[in-house]
Every structure is written in structure tokens, then in C-alpha cells.
Amino acid sequence: MGGIEFDANQLQRVQTAYDLMAEEYDILDHRINPFYVNGYKVLGYFVQKLSPHWRGRTVLDVGCGSGLQTVQFAPQAKHVLAIDISRALMRKVQDKLKAQGLTNVTLLQGNATQLPLQDCSVDFVSSYGDVIGHIQNYEQAIAEMARVCRHGGTVTLEYDNKWHLGLLYQFRELRNAITTRRRGDLRRWTYEYLNHDSKVNLTYKTFTFPEMQSLLNRHGLTVTQRAGTHILSSLIPDKIQDPPKERLPLKSYQVWFLQTIAQCDFHLKRLFPFYTFGYSAIVVARKE
Ligand SMILES: C[S@@+](CC[C@H](N)C(=O)[O-])C[C@H]1O[C@@H](n2cnc3c(N)ncnc32)[C@H](O)[C@@H]1O
């Protein structure tokens, strides 16, 4: 796919990268990280909008990270199961649960492709934050989410979208996208750590909507809702909205500008055709 491959030791690389990110994962400040703050606003909206499907029920949070969605589910869910490959991030979830006095969460350290749960044992599966694109065997992860979800239950995912407006000036990515036909391509994400002097390169998979839809359909899941995040803001270069350390913190006029565009994106998130060009996409599916 466009010359980029998953790393031979993809799982290990992802685990190490996120372990090292744990201490700085929750620096969700507009002056430091507007891209993530704006993205989490849309995810928070969806968690709340979907609450009739998970309130009082059993929720599975796949790739829970530091627990940003886990702690939104826990106060109103019956039981939350949260799984992640990163032990260091799981410790962050534990700290949040303790601080908030939440006792109905079970933490499972492990791989999304092998969920240690019974068939049809949960009501609602959430996997937000582009977890699926990090996983080489992404179809197995979707198969597992579908397996553990009960019939009539809900699976919701956020994934990186193959076609987003930022490709208009990212010529190498555009070329890879065009030459990879009928499915998402593989891209490289470089993360620069804030707390130490290093960077990590991770390979991730993007998806087209028809590709994601047919993956879900193959495992008995039918898409009922779609949305997009970072729609107009994907036109803004990364060095401005996810800036390198030497440009931090952002100036207040830069924050104002990014927040204004993000506000437009928030209004466009469920509007066709805008959501089809978001940097990320959210799908909600029903298990038949
Ligand atoms: C961008 S973070 C999203 C975390 C969280 N849901 C959020 O929105 O902040 C992606 C997460 O996926 C986890 N992850 C990646 N591959 C995984 C796998 N195979 N099994 C379980 N978790 C995985 C990473 O450790 C990381 O915590």
C-alpha cells in the first residue's frame, strides 16, 4: 500500500509508544494541543448522544487509553470493561477511577484482537481515538467487537478517513491515496514527546467508508449513523494545530482561530457531504 507497511513488530511498537506517552497523555490544553481538544469535543458529544444505548448497561471500551471515555461511561453504566495494550495508560485509568470513586470498571490489559470476554456479553462497544487503524489485523479486532456484542447492541468506532481535505496539499499522501485503490492506505504518524527528547513513528491504516461498512457488515454490524471530525480544520497544517514543541504554547490569537474553525466543524460533523471529508470518521453500528 503506497510503499508503507505495518512494522513487523507493530503491536510491540504501539505498546511501547503509548507506554511512553502515558505521563503526558492528558495534557489536553488548547494552547498546547488544539487538535486533540477539538477532536475530544466531538467524541464527548457522541458518548452523550448514544447514552440511551449504554446507560444502565454493560459497556466495553476498546483501546481505552488513559480512560477519557471510560470515565464518561462509568457514572451511568451498569458495568464498564476497559481494555488497552498499554500498561502505563491502564495505570492512568486506575488513578482516574480512584480519584472519582468509580467502582464499576474492570480493567483488562490486552490485545483488541483477542478479547477475553464471552460471546454476546456486552451491550455497547466503543472504540474511539483511531484505535482500529493502529491494529495490523484490524478485521480480527472488528470481528471480536462484533462477537462480544449482544444482538441488538451497538458498536461505535472512530477511524482515520482516507479522503480528507488536508490531502489537497499533502502531495505524497495524496499520491499514495490515489494509487491505493478501493481501500484505505497506510500512513506514518510522527509523535514528538513533550516530556522527553524523542519522537516515534507509527504506521496506521486509513479506511474508506465503503471499506469500513463492508468490514462491519461481514461481522453482522449495520451502520446506522456517520459523522466526521476535523473537517475544515484538516486544511490547517499540522505544524499549527498539532505544533512541534518549539512553537508551544500557542498564542491566544492562534487558539482563537483554531477554536473558531473547530466550532464550524462541530456544526458540520453530521451534515452530508461534509462529514465524508473529515480527518477522522465516526460510525455507529447495530449488531443484527
Ligand atoms: C489514540 S489512543 C485512543 C485512546 C482513547 N480511546 C482516547 O480516545 O483517548 C489509541 C489507543 O489504542 C491502544 N491500542 C492500540 N493497539 C491496540 C491493540 N491491539 N489492543 C488494544 N489496544 C490497542 C493504544 O495503546 C492507545 O491507548
Image (tube, helix red, strand yellow):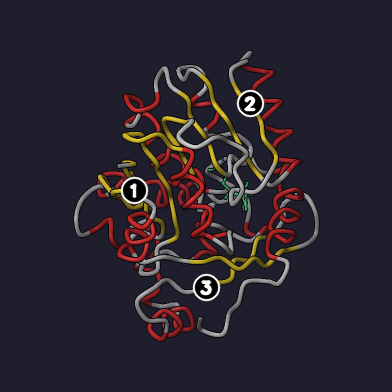
Residue 215 position, x and y percent, is 39, 60
The residue drawn where x is 44% and y is 56% is 159
Query: How many neighbours does mark 3 have within 10 angstroms: few (below 14), some (14-19), or many (20 or more)?
Result: many
Q: Circles 1 and 3: CB distance less than 8 Å?
A: no
- Element under label 1? strand
Q: Earlier in the sequence, mark 2 or mark 3?
A: 2
Q: For the view shown, which residue lies furthest in the right direction? A: 197
The residue drawn where x is 47% and y is 52% is 142
Classify 273 as above or below 40: below
Classify 169 as above or below 150: below
Q: For the view shown, which residue lies furthest in the left direction? A: 272
Three-letter amino acid code of the residue under disc 2: Thr
Q: Which residue is the site of mark 3?
A: 186
Three-letter amino acid code of the residue under disc 3: Leu
Choose between 116 and 60: the one closer to the eye. 116
Q: For the view shown, which residue lies furthest in the front direction? A: 119
Q: Would residue 23 be seen by someone viewing this image from the given angle?
A: no
Question: Alpha-carbon distance for marks 1 and 3?
Answer: 24 Å
The residue drawn where x is 47% and y is 31% is 122
- Element under label 3? strand
Question: Alpha-carbon distance for marks 1 and 2?
Answer: 25 Å
Classify 217 as above or below 54: below
Q: Earlier in the sequence, mark 1 or mark 3?
A: 3
Dividing the image into 4 quarters, which one contains the C terminus?
top left
* Ligand 1 has an atom within 8 Å of the beta carbon of the residue at disc 3: no
Question: Alpha-carbon distance for marks 2 and 3?
Answer: 33 Å
- Element under label 2? strand
Residue 284 position, x and y percent, is 33, 44
Q: Which residue is the site of mark 2?
A: 106
Q: Which residue is the site of mark 1?
A: 221
Residue 139 position, x and y percent, is 49, 59
Choose between 160 and 108: the one closer to the eye. 108
